[in-house]
Image: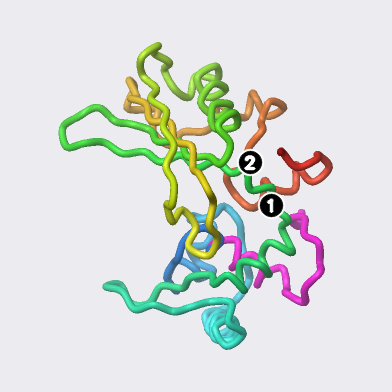
Amino acid sequence: MAEKRTHVTSLTDDELTLLDGMFDHGTSFRLLRRRGFWEQWLRRHDLTDDELRTVLHRFIANGWLTAEACERGTDFFLTPAGGAVWESERRPDWRRLVTDRYWRPPGGIPYVTILGLDPEIRDDFWRIGCDAGLFLKRDDSAKRTVIRDHQWIGWKSFPAIYVLMARLFDPNEIGHHEPYRSCEEQRTWWRFPHEISRFWDEPPIG
């Protein structure tokens, strides 16, 4: 089933899917190729390598992307103009965006860092994850803070980002999101572009 979009632009579904993969960070040609796109973003496009190159060159000419040299070759990033095109199709409620990142100090206990643009929604992600068994909850395990002037998404600025950091007491917790499926009706956030449209019928927060 095709993902929901507004169709206010002339982008094909495949072209919009490419922008989905870059909405919050830059990425390389290799990761944008049809062969590995599913593994990265759990969605597909049908562009051949030659078609992908043509699309990327056109997006750069339109001012929607920049291409920056790096150690692995070239990374592509959305510009504010490209981000506006993507926003017009996906209509994200930004305050519902949540990202979870996992890391482990050398030889130490693993941690999760949860970032959100609304502290209540960030805490929903943590609380529901604990209730579902994704995180083993401990009373003293979560620390909350606010960071400002942080470049979370390069083409868009936010006044504040609300952060929760917690220790993970089971190594199997890292990156495993199956338990959330049992709590789908309680979800207040989106993490990936294909989840955005579930909130289209609800009024924006704030």
According to the picture, the residue beneath numbered tag 2 turns out to be 96
Please give the name of the residue rendered at 32% of the width and 27% of the height, measured from the top-left corner: 171
Q: Which mark is residue 92?
A: 1
Quick check: 200 left or right of 188?
Answer: right
Look at label 1 and name its amino acid.
Pro
Where is residue 85, by image quadrant? bottom right
Outermost residue on the top side: it is: 139
Residue 176 placement (x, y as % from top left): 46, 33
Q: Which residues are magenta?
A: 1-21
Q: Is residue 28 above or below residue 187?
A: below
Outermost residue on the right side: it is: 201
Please give the name of the residue rendered at 19% of the width and 29% of the height, measured from the top-left corner: 108
Residue 84 placement (x, y as % from top left): 66, 67
Where is residue 60, by image quadrant? bottom right
Cα separation between marks 1 and 2: 8 Å
Q: Is residue 50 above or below residue 47?
A: below
